[in-house]
Structures are given as structure tokens and as C-alpha cells.
């Protein structure tokens, strides 16, 4: 066959396959070096860094307000929680109080974004397993959310909507009615996804019992978000460390049982239902008032100190560690990116699986390479 | 303080940004009130009615074929008598009529395969699009993008024929040929209507199943010669899959052959004419219990044979990029594609001949529409089923695929043969 090192170590029963960085199912520029024995994987080495942009370093030369724009580029399919995490950390440094209307709007936007992000996951996961149609159905609904965002702040993906001290713009009555229209359209569709994909026997055969993560392993590897909850560990930042007024809303945290690909998948499907509940409650009980806190200047200079804030982003526990030296830009910005931490378990999970399971497992972890590499 | 931030940019002209993009809630609120929707529905009904009308006017195609052949015979006979008068030797005209006739049939078969490629790709794109709330091709040609695949074919012809540097050149070039030639050959005895086939073979059913199995060699050759590990895996998967599913597929036909007692497709077609109680068609799919079971088994095995979802693991896009086709471009790639759709059409015609009564009309009074229209309609209905399944189901894993074949399909196909034997004994 090939003249390159196809058979590592001169052993002809082993085949080295490069999955990525250009491969339809790695969801970006992830490279996984697979060593195969027939169709069975004996070794897997995830290789990241193809999308590294050095946002932590870039932040050191930018003002705090400008840093918010950087956060949009991490997890570009759900940018609102990224904005929120940085703003929460900066607001902790500044010590400002956020008006309740702004807090509600932040919650609405983050939850809508969670729906959009989970819809993207649901669709691409279907594609990974060969079902193309759920993808476009999911994108039809996601498109409506993006339209809502475009109506709200002019951007469809990189919103820069949540700002330090509040939010960028208030919602219009038309926006609220459009959101209601979307939710009315979306709620019956979730049942449709279940019929089309979630409980399809082939889909179940492909995902149940595949890519098992035990409770202990999930905690040991530091997983968060639906990947952790899929294994049955009840940890959600919105519940355990409420921020932005999440404790005022009534919602439950769906948990998986077995920790298989299907549990992680279905956790996200159930989370969408909870997000719909939160959005409806938040829009119904939207308080009047300002959308920006008093006393946030154009150039903020927080007093020297450090702050850590974390939010439940669509992919897990997104933490921001911010150090200020009193200057106009952060001294240090560190990101605990959920995709990056979640990806690490891949090398352990893939060993012993079939090649076809690689995409099922990789897809179920739901990484965004923009966030992994930052 | 809120002046600090820019006001959101709305489209002042449109009133709101969403004006240019209709949401599904607005787009499909009341489809029948939209004139273009009504017009398209009317057009579709008109096309179907027009085809039926043409069928009624033209009648059976086989009689036109016989007429053409007789004309050819008289023509050559006339030449045979006339030419010697002008001093030309008489001997070479001996088989001219037959040679012309066979070439004509070959051209028709190749045209059927090519047109099927153009039509099926366009249909699949439109069908999948409408299942996914899209429109699919809409521009090329004017009416619903009817020229899209023809123009795609032109593009493929003009494309660079790229070949990996370390590929096995001869095998790489040969593989598409090995795939497409059996596809054309397999169409020889296929019945397109009553007595309408390119070649009358006594062992037609056996011939079709045997010849269509040859293509897998080309797929393995393509996988091997591409010097690409994904291609190699795809080729090997394909070999394992097609060889395995061949067995239940052939066993699913056995009940039909037992009912008829002949391998000739025309005889199988003939045996399903007529109606029970004057209205219920005597198609083999209704010969309970072996008939419907064999139909399902044959359908599932045919899906696997033609590498369609949920059995498309040889070219599993999300795993193996494009499987054995990864390193092919331009017309070589198009040949693989053409062969795939030719096999789909072949499987659909086989399904309609073996189980759906071939050219028989579903109800007695519909027999004024000739058999070739019914044959085509049944084949296209089966093709619709193939596409429907393709755009609905996810894909099996390779080991589940094998389990499904050896542990489920094969035992049931044996049981089906047994059932057919019992039916013949006591019914």
C-alpha cells in the first residue's frame, strides 16, 4: 500500500489512520491519530491546537469591554454564556450591581442560545450516525433563534450582546411576540425529534451501551455539562452556584443513567425542554427598569485584585479567572473551557471501540474546537 | 448611560429584519392560498395524467418493437435482393437486421441507465429537500431545477481526472469500468413491460442476480488501488457486506421461483396476471404468508446490495469520508454514481417483477393503461421507498450490519422458503 508509515512499528496487523484535521465528523479541526487492528481501535491520540488564536494573550492588550468581543469566538455556536462569564468576572472585580431586567434578559438569551447549541448538536449527531434529515429540521429551528438574535443585536453568531454592567439593547415588543411564536413552533418539534431520531431502533443500537463513562471516571476527568450529567452526576452551575438570578426560576436538571452516548444525547434533548420553560418564565415575569447598571464607564479600570466566575455554558462549566492590576486591560485572563476538559477523556474511551463508534463517541462529547483551542 | 451602547440596527425599509426570511410558521401557514403552490400541484397532476394519456394512446410498447423489427427485416431483405443487381456481394448482409436490432437495444439500455442517473439524482435531491423543508435545486433549467443533474454531468466531464501519486494506476483506472459494465449487462433480461426486454433469457432471474454481484470486485479494486486507508476500509466493508447480503437476497426470490416454476422473468410476470374475486390482484406480495415475507426480505437485502442507507457503510460519509470513492473525481466518480443508481433501478424493477405483479394493473378496469406504464410506476414507487428510507434512517455499524444479516435475514429467508414449500403442498 502506502510508502509512508502505514504500519506502525513494522507490525502489519496494525494500521495507523489519521482522523482529521480535515474530516467531516471531527466537527472542526481536531485530529485523532487512530491505531487500528482491523476495525478495532487499539490506540487513540487526540491532537488539538489547529485553531489556536491566543485569546488570553490578546486580552492583555485590550480594554475590558473589548474583551467581551473576544469571548464570542470561543464557543461560537453558543456565544451568550461566554459573554456572560467574562462580564460576571469583570463585574465581580468592579463590584457593580446588575439591574433585574438586565439579569432576566441575560437568562433569556443564554437559554435561547442553549437551545440553539443543543439543536446544532442534535442535528450533527444525527449526521454522524448517518441520519441527514434531523440535521436540517434542527437547523430550521436554530435559524429562527439566529433570526431572533439578529433582530435583537444585529449579529447571528458573535453577539457581543451581554456587556459589562448589563446588556447592549432592550428587547422590543415585536421581538417578544416573535419569540413566543418561535416557542410555540418549537415545542411540538421536540417530540418530532424523538420520533425521528431519539427512539429510532438503529439509533439506539448505535448509541446505547457505546462510549460508557462511569460516574467516577466522569468526575475524575473533570467533565462538566451534559457529559457529566449523562453519567448521572447531579452538577449544574445554575443550581449549585446560581448566577444572574437563575435561582428565581423553576427548572429541573435532567440526568442520564448509564453514561452512554445515548444518555448524553438525551440529556441535551431534555435540557432543551427545561430551557424553554426558563425562557417562558423569564419573558412572562420580565421586570421593568434599566438594562445597564449605573456607574460603568467607557473605559473600566477595576481595582487590583482577582475574580473567578463560572457559568453553565451549553457545553459545561465555563470558568473565567480574571486578574486586574488596576489598569485599563486585564493583567491575566484564564479560561476554563468545557470543551477542552471534556475532550481529554476521548483517548481513554476510544480504545477497544470500532471505527464507526469513533464518530458516535466524539459527537456525543459535543466539542467546539474554537473553545478547545481558544 | 444606555447611550453608551449603539442602538440595534433594524432594517428601516423592511420594518424588521425578518421580513426577507419567512419563518416556517409564516411560509406554511396556509399553502393552498399561495398561487404558486396551487399551480405546482396542478402541474404535477397534469404531468401524471399526461403520462397516463400517452400510455393509453401508444399502447403496448412491445408491439411497436415487433413492428420495428419486421421493418428492419423487410428492409434488409429488400437490400439483399436489390444490391446484387448493382454488382455488390450478397453475403455480408446476412445478419445485418439482427446486428442493427441488437445495437438498437443496447443503445436503449444504456440510455435508460443514463437517463435514470439524471432523473434519480434530481428526484432524490428534490425529495430529500422537501422532506427537510428545503426546496432543492430551483434555478438550473427554469422549472424546479430540472437541468441541474445534466449540468452537473457536464461539470463532471470537464473536471480534472485526479489520481493519487502512489495509487495503483491500472487498477485505479479499471475499477469504475468493472463496476459499471455489470450494471449495464444486468439490464439485458430486465422486463420493462409485458414481453418488453432486451434479451429473452430462460434463466433471467438467475442471470440478473449473478451479474449484478460482479460489481463488488470493482469496488474492492477501487478501495485497494486508491492508496487511501479510508478507501481501503470502505472497499473491504463493501466486499463483506455485498457478499453476505447476496445470500438472503437470492433466497428471498426462491419462493417466487417455486410458485412459478420458471426463472424466466416474462413467465414470472405472466403468472401474476389476473385477479382474485375479480378485483384483488394476484401479485406474489399478496400470497400470504411467504409472499409478503419474501418481499420484505428482498427489499431489505436489496437496500444493502445497493449500499443505501441504512446499509451505506461502504461509503459512510461521516466515518470514511466517501469510502471507496474518496480518491475518484470527474467522470470516474460519475461512473460509480451511475452504477449505484443503475443498481437501485435494477432492484426496483426486480421488486416489481418478482412481487408487485410486473406489468399487471392494480385493478381490472385500469388495464387500458399499458403494462410498461404500470411497470415503471411500480419501479418508481419502490425507488421512492428507497429514497424515503435513505432520508429517514441512521446507519448501522459494520458489526451490527453483519449480525442483522446472518442472525436475522438469513434464518428468515430459509423459513420463507420452507413456508412457500408448505403453501405449495397444501394450498
Image: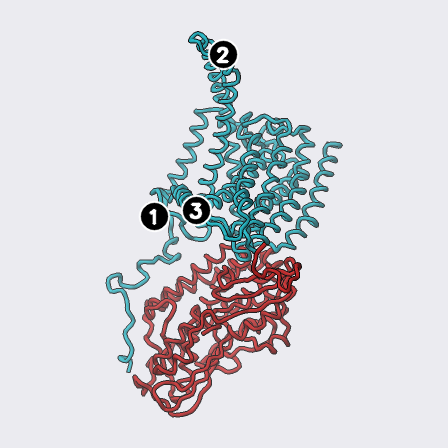
Disc 3 or disc 2, which is closer to the eye? 2
Chain identifier of the residue bearing label 1 in the image? B
Q: Quadrant of residue A254?
A: bottom right
Residue placed under numbered mark 1 in the picture: B34
Chain identifier of the residue bearing label 3 in the image? B
Say whether mark 2 and mark 1 are on the same chain.
yes
Q: Position of residue A370 (x, y in %)?
A: 45, 70
Q: Is residue B399 above or below residue B64?
A: below
Residue under the image location 34 percent in, 84 percent down: A293
What color is chain B drawn in? cyan
Left or right of B294 in this view: A173? left
Q: Position of residue A143 (x, y in %)?
A: 40, 62
| Mark 1 vs 2, N-terminal side | 1
Q: Is residue B407 above or below residue B292?
A: below
User: In terms of depth relative to the viewer, which is nearer, A293 or B159?
Assistant: B159
| Mark 3 vs 2, N-terminal side | 2
Say whether mark 1 and mark 3 are on the same chain.
yes
**Regarding mark 3 in the picture, which secondary structure is present there?**
helix
Residue placed under numbered mark 2 in the picture: B90
User: In terms of depth relative to the viewer, which is nearer, A297 or B106?
Assistant: B106
Crowding around mark 1 (Cα neighbors within 10 Å: few <14, some 14 to 19, many 20+) is few
Q: Quadrant of the N terminus of chain A?
A: bottom right
Q: Quadrant of the C terminus of chain A?
A: bottom left
Q: CA–CA distance between discs 1 and 2?
A: 69 Å
Residue placed under numbered mark 3 in the picture: B126
Disc 3 or disc 1, which is closer to the eye? 3
Chain identifier of the residue bearing label 2 in the image? B
Q: CA–CA distance between discs 3 and 2?
A: 55 Å
What color is chain A drawn in? red
Amino acid at each position: 500500500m502506502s510508502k509512508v508509515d502505514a504500519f506502525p512499528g513494522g507490525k502489519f496487523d496494525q494500521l495507523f489512520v489519521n482522523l482529521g484535521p480535515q474530516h467531516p465528523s471531527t466537527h472542526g479541526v481536531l485530529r485523532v491519530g487512530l491505531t487500528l487492528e482491523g476495525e478495532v481501535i487499539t490506540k487513540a491520540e487526540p491532537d488539538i491546537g489547529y485553531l489556536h488564536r491566543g485569546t488570553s494573550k490578546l486580552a492583555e492588550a485590550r480594554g475590558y469591554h473589548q474583551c467581551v468581543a473576544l469571548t464570542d469566538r470561543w464557543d461560537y455556536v453558543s456565544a451568550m454564556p461566554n459573554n456572560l462569564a467574562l462580564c460576571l468576572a469583570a463585574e465581580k472585580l468592579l463590584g457593580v450591581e446588575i439591574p433585574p431586567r438586565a439579569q432576566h434578559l441575560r437568562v433569556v438569551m443564554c437559554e435561547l442560545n442553549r437551545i440553539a447549541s443543543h439543536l446544532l448538536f442534535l442535528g450533527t449527531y444525527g449526521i454522524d450516525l448517518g441520519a441527514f434529515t434531523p440535521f436540517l429540521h434542527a437547523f430550521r429551528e436554530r435559524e429562527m433563534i439566529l433570526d431572533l438574535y439578529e433582530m435583537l443585536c444585529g449579529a447571528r453568531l458573535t453577539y457581543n450582546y451581554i456587556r459589562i454592567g448589563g446588556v447592549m439593547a432592550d428587547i422590543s415588543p415585536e421581538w417578544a411576540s416573535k419569540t413566543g411564536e418561535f416557542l410555540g413552533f418549537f415545542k411540538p418539534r421536540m417530540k418530532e425529534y424523538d420520533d425521528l431520531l431519539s427512539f429510532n431502533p438503529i439509533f439506539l443500537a448505535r448509541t446505547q451501551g457505546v462510549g460508557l463513562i462511569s460516574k467516577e471516571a466522569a468526575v475524575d476527568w473533570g467533565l462538566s455539562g451534559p457529559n457529566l450529567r449523562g453519567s448521572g452526576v447531579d452538577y449544574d452551575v445554575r443550581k449549585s452556584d446560581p448566577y444572574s438570578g437563575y435561582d428565581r426560576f423553576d427548572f429541573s436538571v435532567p440526568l442520564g443513567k448509564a453514561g452512554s452516548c445515548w444518555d448524553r444525547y438525551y440529556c441535551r434533548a431534555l435540557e432543551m425542554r427545561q430551557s424553554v420553560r426558563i425562557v417562558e418564565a423569564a419573558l412572562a415575569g420580565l421586570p421593568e427598569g434599566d438594562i445597564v447598571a449605573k456607574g460603568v464607564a467607557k473605559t473600566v479600570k477595576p481595582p487590583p485584585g482577582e475574580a473567578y466566575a463560572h457559568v453553565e455554558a451549553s457545553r459545561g462549566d465555563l470558568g473565567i479567572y480574571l486578574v486586574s492590576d488596576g489598569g485599563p486591560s486585564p493583567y491575566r485572563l484564564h479560561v476554563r473551557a468545557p470543551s477542552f476538559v471534556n475532550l481529554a477523556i476521548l483517548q481513554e474511551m476510544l480504545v477497544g471501540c470500532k471505527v464507526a463508534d469513533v464518530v458516535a463517541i466524539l459527537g456525543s462529547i459535543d466539542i467546539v474546537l474554537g473553545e478547545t483551542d481558544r | 448611560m444606555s447611550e453608551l451602547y449603539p442602538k440595534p440596527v433594524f432594517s428601516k425599509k423592511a420594518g424588521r429584519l425578518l421580513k426577507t426570511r419567512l419563518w416556517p410558521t409564516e411560509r406554511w401557514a396556509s399553502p393552498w392560498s399561495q398561487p404558486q403552490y396551487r399551480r405546482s400541484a396542478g402541474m404535477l397532476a397534469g404531468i401524471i395524467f399526461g403520462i397516463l394519456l400517452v400510455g393509453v394512446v401508444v399502447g403496448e410498447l412491445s408491439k411497436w418493437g415487433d413492428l420495428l423489427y419486421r421493418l428492419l427485416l423487410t428492409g434488409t431483405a429488400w437490400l439483399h435482393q436489390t444490391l446484387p443487381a448493382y454488382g455488390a456481394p450478397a453475403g455480408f448482409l446476412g445478419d445485418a437486421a439482427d446486428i442493427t436490432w441488437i445495437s438498437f437495444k443496447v443503445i436503449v439500455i444504456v440510455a435508460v441507465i443514463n437517463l435514470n442517473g439524471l432523473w434519480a439524482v434530481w428526484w432524490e435531491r428534490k425529495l430529500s429537500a422537501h422532506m427537510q423543508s428545503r426546496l432543492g435545486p430551483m434555478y438550473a433549467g427554469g422549472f424546479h431545477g430540472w437541468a441541474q443533474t445534466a449540468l452537473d454531468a457536464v461539470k463532471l466531464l470537464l473536471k480534472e481526472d485526479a489520481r493519487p501519486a502512489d495509487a495503483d494506476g491500472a487498477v485505479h483506472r479499471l475499477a469504475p469500468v468493472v463496476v459499471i459494465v455489470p450494471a449495464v449487462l444486468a439490464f439485458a433480461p430486465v422486463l420493462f413491460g409485458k414481453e418488453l426486454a432486451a434479451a429473452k433469457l430462460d434463466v433471467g432471474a438467475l442471470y440478473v442476480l449473478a451479474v449484478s454481484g460482479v460489481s463488488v470486485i470493482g469496488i474492492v479494486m477501487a478501495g485497494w488501488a486508491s492508496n487511501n486507508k479510508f478507501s481501503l476500509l470502505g472497499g473491504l466493508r463493501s466486499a463483506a457486506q455485498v457478499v453476505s447480503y447476496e445470500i438472503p437476497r437470492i433466497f428471498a426470490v426462491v419462493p417466487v421461483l417455486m410458485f412459478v416454476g420458471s426463472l424466466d422473468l416474462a413467465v414470472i410476470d405472466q403468472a401474476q396476471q389476473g385477479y382474485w374475486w375479480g378485483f384483488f390482484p394476484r401479485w406474489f406480495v399478496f400470497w400470504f404468508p411467504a409472499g409478503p415475507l419474501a418481499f420484505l426480505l428482498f427489499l431489505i437485502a436489496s437496500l444493502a446490495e445497493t449500499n443505501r442507507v441504512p446499509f451505506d457503510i461502504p461509503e459512510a460519509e461521516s466515518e470514511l469520508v466517501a469510502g471507496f470513492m474518496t480518491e475518484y473525481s470527474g467522470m470516474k466518480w460519475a461512473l460509480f454514481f451511475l452504477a449505484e443508481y443503475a443498481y437501485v433501478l435494477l432492484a426496483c424493477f426486480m421488486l416489481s417483477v418478482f412481487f408487485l405483479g410486473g406489468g399487471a394493473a392494480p385493478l381490472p378496469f385500469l388495464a387500458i393503461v399499458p403494462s410498461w406504464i404500470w411497470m415503471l410506476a411500480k419501479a418508481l414507487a419502490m425507488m421512492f421507498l428507497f429514497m424515503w428510507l435513505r432520508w429517514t434512517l441512521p446507519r448501522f455499524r459494520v458489526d451490527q450490519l453483519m449480525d442483522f444479516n446472518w442472525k436475522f435475514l438469513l434464518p428468515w429467508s430459509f423459513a420463507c422458503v420452507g413456508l412457500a414449500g408448505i403453501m405449495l403442498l397444501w394450498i
